[in-house]
Image (cartoon, grey):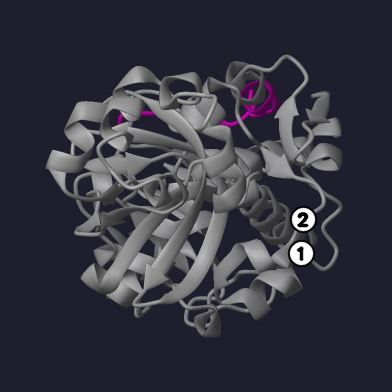
């Protein structure tokens, strides 16, 4: 089988690259290990697909941030990108961008319809890829003039595997789970399992607050989750068990104001009964500083995004490899990752757009 461009991975960045190449009339094929493309895409944003963020804040990105800034320098935004394919978007009050239909299937369908002229090879894992005479031989049967590596990351899978890229000469910044639940003492969370509470969450080392996030916290069996917790989870890599998560359940009030409130309002008037039953056994200060020791992060299967990957130093500005000029590496495989809020999908679309522009012009 001979094709102009093989796209390894049928996730967000791979489908976006395929849609753009198909629109330009370029012959391409998507090689996807799952039985359908876009499997992770339809689960993002609780099934609504938080496909971008406006305005785009570079402070939300981590890893090779300078490289990310250069990629985004001519990027006009996810809303403009999807307008090319007829998908209307809208942002919520926090700047999170969603399809107007409020369903992730609309995003996936838009990309799939745009890829209708491309060959989609599902159930086809990429198990080998070697460079031969300026082309790539994939799985010993597919020859491609160009390859776009859009495999994403091991997030949501049992373990990371970058052996194919490493065999091609690329190094890998050690992968770590990012945007994942934080593991804590089971005895603290078991009575609260399934409950959610709004809180100002602080990551603390000793007496120093490293970072704060306001949002909804979910109590799980032996872990804390929710967007704010996931945004703090990357700190576990740097601080480990020295890190403590503190929850301020009423950030709107000072401790003194809270004490006055509790003269006339019981804790059950403020919180779910199970939370109130625990807090009433603790000093009032606990409401403003409820501490949970950090014991680690959830495993890869419960992780949304990876930190680490191919370092930007090994890529050109158009995301082509400095080792193999006909190989492009895009999306989450690059050592750039973002906070919750659509930043990672925005990176997927932007890298796909930049590399396909280069391919179309070549």
- The residue identified by callout 1 is 72
* Magenta stretch in the rendered image: 110-123
Residue 164 picture location, percent across and down: 29, 64
Residue for point 40% across, 77% down: 207
Q: Which mark is residue 348?
A: none
Question: How many residues crowd mark 2 within 10 Å: few (<14), some (14–19), many (20+)?
Answer: some
Question: How many residues crowd mark 1 within 10 Å: few (<14), some (14–19), many (20+)?
Answer: some
- The residue identified by callout 2 is 56
Identity of the residue furthest to the front in this view: 263
Q: In this rendering, would 350 be left or right of 248?
A: right
Task: Return the residue nearer the eye: 103 or 351.
Answer: 103
**For numbered disc 2, what is the local secondary structure?**
loop
Task: Return the residue nearer the eye: 200 or 80.
Answer: 200
Residue for point 72% across, 53% down: 353
- Quadrant of residue 114 within the rendered picture: top right
Residue 97 picture location, percent across and down: 74, 35
């Amino acid at each position: 089988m001979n094709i102009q461009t093989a796209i390894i991975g049928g996730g967000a960045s791979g489908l976006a690259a395929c849609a753009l190449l198909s629109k330009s009339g370029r012959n391409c094929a998507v090689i996807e290990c799952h039985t359908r493309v876009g499997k992770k895409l339809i689960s993002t944003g609780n099934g609504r697909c938080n496909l971008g963020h406006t305005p785009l804040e570079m402070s939300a990105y981590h890893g090779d941030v300078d490289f990310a800034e250069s990629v985004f320098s001519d990027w006009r935004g996810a809303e403009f990108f999807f307008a090319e394919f007829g998908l209307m978007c809208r942002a919520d009050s926090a700047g999170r961008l969603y399809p107007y239909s409020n369903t992730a299937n609309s995003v996936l369908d838009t990309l799939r319809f745009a890829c209708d002229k491309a060959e989609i090879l599902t159930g086809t894992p990429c198990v080998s890829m070697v460079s031969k005479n300026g082309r790539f031989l994939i799985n010993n049967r597919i020859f491609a003039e160009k390859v776009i590596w859009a495999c994403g990351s091991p997030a949501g899978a049992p373990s990371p595997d970058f052996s194919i890229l490493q065999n091609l000469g690329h190094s890998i910044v050690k992968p770590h789970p990012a945007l994942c639940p934080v593991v804590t003492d089971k005895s603290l969370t078991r009575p609260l399992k399934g409950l959610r509470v709004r809180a100002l969450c602080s990551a603390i080392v000793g007496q120093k607050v490293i970072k704060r996030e306001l949002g909804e916290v979910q109590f799980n069996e032996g872990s804390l989750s929710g967007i704010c917790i996931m945004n703090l989870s990357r700190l576990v890599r740097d601080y480990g068990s020295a890190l403590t998560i503190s929850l301020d359940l009423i950030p709107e009030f000072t401790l003194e104001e809270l004490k006055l409130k509790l003269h006339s309002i019981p804790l059950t008037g403020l919180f779910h009964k199970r939370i109130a039953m625990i807090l009433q056994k603790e000093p009032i200060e606990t409401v403003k500083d409820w501490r949970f020791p950090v014991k680690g992060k959830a495993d890869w299967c419960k992780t949304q995004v990876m930190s680490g990957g191919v370092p930007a130093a090994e890529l050109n500005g158009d995301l082509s490899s400095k080792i193999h000029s006909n190989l492009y590496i895009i999306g989450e495989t690059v050592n750039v990752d973002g906070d919750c809020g659509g930043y990672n999908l925005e990176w997927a679309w932007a890298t796909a757009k930049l590399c396909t522009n280069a391919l179309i012009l070549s």
